[in-house]
Amino acid sequence: RSRTASLRASKMSEAKTLKKGFTLVEILIVLGIVAMLSVLAVNGYMSYRKSTLLDFAADNLIAQINEMKSKTRHGGGDSVKFEEIKAELEGGGSVDGEDVGSDSGSQCYGIYFENSGDGFVAKSFVRPFGNQKVWDPVEGKWNYNGCGNFIPGDNDVLLEKDSQVNIIEIDEGAVVGSFMIRFVPPNGDVEMLKDAQPFVGDSVKIKLQYGTEADPQYQREIILDLIN
């Protein structure tokens, strides 16, 4: 009997052991691990999201400028009229001051950046191409002044981008007020104005940043090749 009682007691003790739950310390440890993994996952996602939005904004800016150059060179889709004006301009047979190709359908495409205090606002624009060919006796060549003086317009289109992506610097910080890039038909020659003064260069650097904190991890610097 004593042996039987001992076996019963052992089985009861074993059953109690099996029914035993987690302790408070174990639960807290598990919750701490879950919380830490959650924080790491959220931080990783946020970092990925910021980097992706920056890359997208940079690619979008480059794509839009390349599209403007392409439209300028190809006459905005009207290839027949474009070839007519190009042949007329390259012929060199017009008199001083004659308007050439004012009804060609060709247009001047461009983009400009205005300082808004916290960064630069970018807008694209389109202007009619009423080209005037003028002979320069000093240089001995025809000059084409087709796009005229640049003035911002009400119909200019704001560059679409995430609201947290900011254009913080142009030309390595040399631009204070505004910077304009414009392509002129028929060959897509580039014209640039930096703070309302002519700017000469083969390229320009533009720096983008996510948010307001100057963290190099969330900045992108792109170089616009404006000649090729």
Image (cartoon, grey):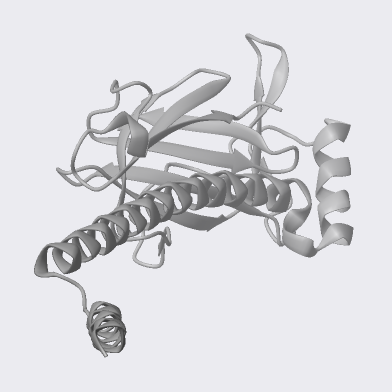
- Answer left or right for 25 relative to 199: left
- Answer left or right for 208 relative to 21: right
Occupied quadrant, residue 42: bottom left
Looking at the figure, which quarter contains the N terminus?
bottom left
| Residue at (80% x, 38% y) in the render | 89
- Answer left or right for 92 relative to 157: right
Q: Residue reaching furthest left?
A: 24
Would residue 32 be visible to someone looking at this image?
yes
| Residue at (29% x, 79% y) in the render | 14
Q: Position of residue 122 (x, y in %)?
A: 37, 50
Question: In the rendered view, would you say 50 is above or below 195?
Answer: below
Q: Nearer the viewer, residue 158 or 167?
A: 167
Would residue 130 be visible to someone looking at this image?
no
| Residue at (73% x, 52% y) in the render | 101
- Answer left or right for 62 relative to 197: right
Question: In the rendered view, would you say 152 is above or below 31?
Answer: above
| Residue at (31% x, 88% y) in the render | 4
Q: Position of residue 227 (x, y in %)?
A: 66, 26
Q: Nearer the viewer, residue 66 or 16?
A: 16
